[in-house]
């Protein structure tokens, strides 16, 4: 099991009403905007000096239909939230995490990083890019106390693509996904 002293959950959805701190643990952070990330990590470290786990769970997944002119604001928000947000948050906390006896950076990517969904090309591309960033980070941090973990969920009953996804029988129930993930993480692993 991951030895957790205090953890931060970076959770952004792209929905301004839900793009706020999520109090899932002793610490929580705001969205992936550069300004929010300048303030949040400093506050977290001051409030929780034993912070040793960062969970980057962010995602905007919208139909982006790349065979037509793209909505620049939509594509920019997808890239900022899904890729730049986790990179910025990890960067903001990495020096603190390296000072801990044992620390984890956990990124939630997506099955679409490996098997893309054409109608959500930007989402898939950002999750694939984050997968590559994690591969590099794992190698670069191998001689530190920080371990990197990637969670790539399947199609899960969440509101990522809208309220109808919550009841889609083709999707894995959210609680089942959480339970299975925690069971697999029992003995600490860095790859699944």
Image (spheres, helix red, strand yellow):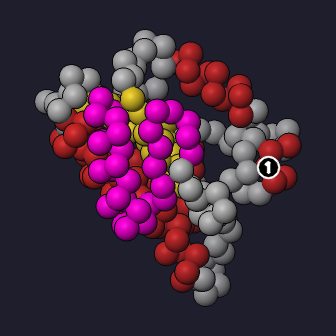
Residue 161 in the figure: left or right of residue 142: right
Q: Give how far across and how far down residue 27 sits, in percent.
A: 44, 38
Q: Give how far across and how far down residue 112 sits, in percent.
A: 57, 50
Q: Is residue 32 magenta?
A: yes
The answer to whether residue 79 is above or below residue 187 is below
Residue range in magenta is 22-51
Residue 185 in the figure: left or right of residue 103: right
Q: Give how far across and how far down residue 121 sits, in percent.
A: 57, 65
Q: Give how far across and how far down residue 66 sits, in percent.
A: 60, 77
* Image point (40%, 47%), residue name: 131
- Front residue (pair 136, 187): 187
Report if residue 65 is visible in the image: yes
Q: Is residue 48 magenta?
A: yes
The answer to whether residue 118 is above or below residue 147 is below
- Front residue (pair 155, 29): 29
Report if residue 55 is visible in the image: no
List the residue tagged with mark 1. 165
* Image point (62%, 66%), residue name: 16
- To which quarter of the image does residue 180 belong? top right
């Amino acid at each position: 099991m991951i030895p957790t002293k205090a953890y931060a959950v970076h959770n952004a959805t792209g929905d301004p009403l839900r793009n706020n701190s999520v109090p899932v643990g002793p610490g929580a952070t705001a969205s992936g905007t550069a300004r929010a990330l300048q303030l949040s990590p400093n506050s977290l470290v001051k409030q929780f000096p034993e912070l040793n786990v960062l969970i980057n769970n962010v995602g905007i997944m919208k139909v982006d239909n790349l065979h037509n002119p793209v909505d620049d604001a939509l594509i920019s928000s997808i890239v900022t939230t899904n890729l730049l947000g986790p990179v910025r948050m990890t960067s903001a906390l990495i020096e603190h995490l390296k000072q801990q006896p044992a620390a984890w950076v956990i990124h939630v990517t997506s099955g679409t990083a490996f098997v893309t969904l054409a109608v959500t090309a930007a989402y898939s591309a950002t999750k694939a890019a984050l997968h590559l960033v994690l591969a590099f980070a794992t190698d670069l941090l191998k001689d530190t106390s920080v371990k990197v973990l990637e969670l790539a969920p399947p199609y899960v009953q969440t509101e990522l693509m809208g309220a109808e996804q919550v009841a889609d029988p083709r999707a894995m129930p959210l609680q089942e996904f959480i339970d299975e993930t925690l069971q697999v993480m029992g003995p600490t692993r860095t790859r699944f």
